[in-house]
Image (tube, helix red, strand yellow):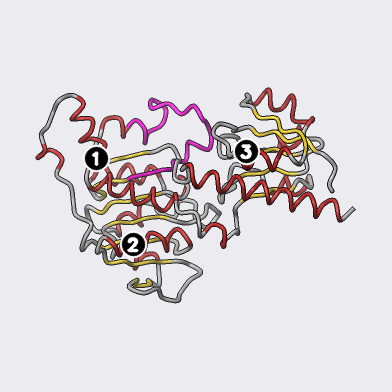
């Protein structure tokens, strides 16, 4: 058996009890929120660090973890961790990236994509706010049907495939583009280019990882290719969309609306204020932009399953590491 280790979990609220049991079987589990300064001060005492998206694990943090063996993040996106420097420091990063078989059982983000689309098309947040002030003007909140609309999906991986299922149930025509995929799916038209897809998208949903090729993938030229009055839903990463171009398209009417679970600013500060972020400021005064705080994967069921999966992944990692010595 591997020697007992010290584990620090920085985001313990509502953490799976089953995952906790697994982690405690490995050694001492310390669970607490702390400031960056507190983390830098105490990280040298721990072998394993558990985070999600609320912390930037950069060079300074990795240097502070002088005996750190692994960073665990139950996420597929890892832009909150300096992966190259972690590799230099021989600190393993354990995540959900590439865990295709397991991830096919996790539907939360795909379901949230559809929830955002329905909320946007039926203007639900603004209708609710109107009711709260005793305004029952139903004509002010006429929405749009999804049936018969053309849905364009960028990224036909596990999330894109789930969204295809939901679109079929709502009677939508589905188009898709994926740079690494050309084979068809029943009732889906595979487009040969992003430009072709955009021209056929009354609704555009994004399901791509953030990397050098996808930063600002959807910019001013791409938004202009969409049919006038299209809507956009992004549950991937904020930097996939050029936010200045998005705002311009919303203001001009080229886009009728957008629903975002992610924005670029969320990765630089947990204290984003509406007076400092243009997207949030716009959403405060307009009823065609809906933003949620990166909660796509945040369901009780999905988070518990991923926490248990990652705890077991740590067990395997430690057993492999111990057997190599």
Quadrant housing residue 8: top right
Where is residue 111 drawn, in percent x and y?
Answer: 39, 51
Residue occupied by mark 3: 51
Q: Residue at x 29, y 47 (%)?
A: 249
Where is residue 287 drawn, in percent x and y?
Answer: 24, 37
Residue occupied by mark 1: 124
Residue occupied by mark 2: 152
Relative vertical location of residue 249 with respect to residue 271 in this rendering, above or below: below
Where is residue 78 drawn, in percent x and y?
Answer: 59, 47
Relative vertical location of residue 197 with respect to residue 270 in this rendering, above or below: below
Where is residue 97 drawn, in percent x and y?
Answer: 60, 55
Tell me the element at label 1: helix
- 244 relative position to 30: left or right: left
Relative vertical location of residue 262 with respect to residue 133 in this rendering, above or below: below
- 167 relative position to 302: left or right: left
- Determine the CA span between mark 2 and mark 1: 22 Å
State if disc 1 and disc 3 touch (CB < 8 Å).
no
């Amino acid at each position: 058996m591997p020697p007992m280790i010290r584990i620090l979990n920085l985001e313990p609220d509502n953490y799976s009890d089953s995952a906790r049991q697994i982690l405690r079987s490995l050694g001492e589990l310390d669970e607490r929120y702390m400031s960056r300064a507190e983390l830098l001060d105490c990280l040298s005492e721990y072998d394993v660090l558990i985070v999600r998206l609320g912390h930037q694990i950069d060079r300074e943090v990795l240097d502070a973890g002088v005996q750190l063996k692994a960073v665990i993040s139950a996420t597929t996106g890892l832009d909150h961790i300096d992966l190259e420097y972690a590799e230099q420091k021989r600190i393993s990063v354990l995540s959900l990236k590439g865990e295709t078989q397991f991830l096919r059982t996790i539907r939360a983000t795909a379901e949230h994509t559809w929830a955002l689309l329905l909320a946007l098309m039926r203007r639900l947040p603004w209708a609710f706010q109107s009711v709260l002030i005793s305004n029952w003007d139903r004509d002010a909140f006429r929405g749009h049907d999804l049936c018969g609309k053309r849905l364009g999906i960028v990224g036909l991986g596990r999330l894109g495939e789930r969204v295809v299922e939901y679109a079929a149930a709502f009677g939508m025509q589905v188009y898709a583009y994926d740079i690494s995929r050309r084979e068809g799916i029943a009732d889906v038209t595979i487009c040969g280019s992003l430009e072709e897809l955009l021209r056929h998208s009354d609704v555009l949903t994004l399901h791509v990882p953030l990397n050098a090729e996808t930063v600002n993938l959807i910019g001013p030229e791409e938004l202009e290719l969409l049919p006038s009055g299209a809507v956009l839903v992004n549950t991937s990463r904020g930097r996939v969309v050029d936010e200045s171009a998005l705002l311009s398209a919303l203001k001009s009417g080229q886009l009728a609306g957008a629903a975002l679970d992610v924005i670029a600013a969320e990765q630089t500060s947990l204290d984003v204020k509406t007076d400092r972020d243009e997207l949030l400021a716009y959403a405060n005064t307009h009823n065609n932009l809906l933003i949620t705080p990166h909660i796509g994967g945040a369901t009780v069921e999905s988070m518990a399953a991923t926490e248990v999966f990652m705890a077991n992944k740590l067990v395997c990692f430690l057993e492999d590491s111990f057997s190599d010595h």
